[in-house]
Image (cartoon, rainbow, N blue to C red):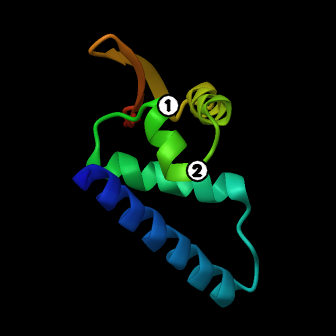
């Protein structure tokens, strides 16, 4: 229950921040960018993200949540892993040249 509450607060904060950013820049942020920002913020406080997390954070269907995670993995931003037998994604480790 507490986690759901915190996620709703984070989601509201991100939406407010995007609105302020849009007003300052004079441009709108598309849904895909907003979703990526929500996922990035989530991963700052969590070691991994699962389909259900994206579903709740972004208010999307299970298929869309899966597509978002698969796309981020294909771009090299996330790495697929297993957590307690469940599919999850971790941020790709940063590489130093």
Query: Quick one: which residue is furthest to the bottom in this view?
Result: 24
Tell me residue 27's x, y (percent): 76, 78
- Based on the displayed image, in which of its 4 quarters is residue 95 positioned? top left
The residue at which mark 1 appears reads as: 51
Disc 2/disc 1 C-alpha distance (Å) = 11 Å
Query: Quick one: which residue is furthest to the left in this view?
Result: 2
Which residue is rendered at x = 61% and y = 26% of the image? 70
> Which of the marked residues, 2 or 1, is nearer the chain's N terminus?
1
29 relative to 22, above or below: above
Q: Which mark is residue 31?
A: none
Task: Say which of 48 and 50 sits in front.
Answer: 50
The mark tally for this picture is 2
Which residue is rendered at x = 64% and y = 38% of the image? 61
Task: Say which of 2 and 70 sits in front.
Answer: 2
Assess disc 2: are there few (<14), some (14-19) or many (≥20) residues with their C-alpha within 10 Å of its C-alpha.
few
69 relative to 13, above or below: above
Q: Is residue 3 left or right of residue 77?
A: left
Q: Is residue 77 left or right of residue 10?
A: right
SS class of the residue under badge 1?
helix
SS class of the residue under badge 2?
loop
Image quarter where the C terminus lies is: top left
48 relative to 22, above or below: above
Tell me residue 44's x, y (percent): 32, 51
- Based on the displayed image, in which of its 4 quarters is residue 19 positioned? bottom right
The residue at which mark 2 appears reads as: 59
Assess disc 1: are there few (<14), some (14-19) or many (≥20) residues with their C-alpha within 10 Å of its C-alpha.
many
Which of discs 2 and 1 lies nearer the camera? The answer is 2
Tell me residue 6's x, y (percent): 30, 60
Tell me residue 62's x, y (percent): 60, 31
């Amino acid at each position: 229950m507490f986690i759901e509450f915190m996620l709703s607060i984070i989601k509201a904060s991100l939406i407010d921040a995007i609105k302020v950013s849009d007003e300052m820049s004079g441009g709108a942020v598309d849904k895909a960018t907003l979703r990526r920002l929500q996922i990035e913020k989530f991963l700052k406080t969590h070691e991994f993200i699962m389909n259900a997390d994206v579903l709740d954070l972004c208010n999307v269907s299970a298929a869309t949540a899966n597509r978002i995670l698969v796309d981020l993995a294909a771009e090299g931003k996330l790495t697929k892993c297993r957590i307690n037998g469940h599919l999850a994604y971790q941020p790709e480790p940063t590489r130093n040249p």
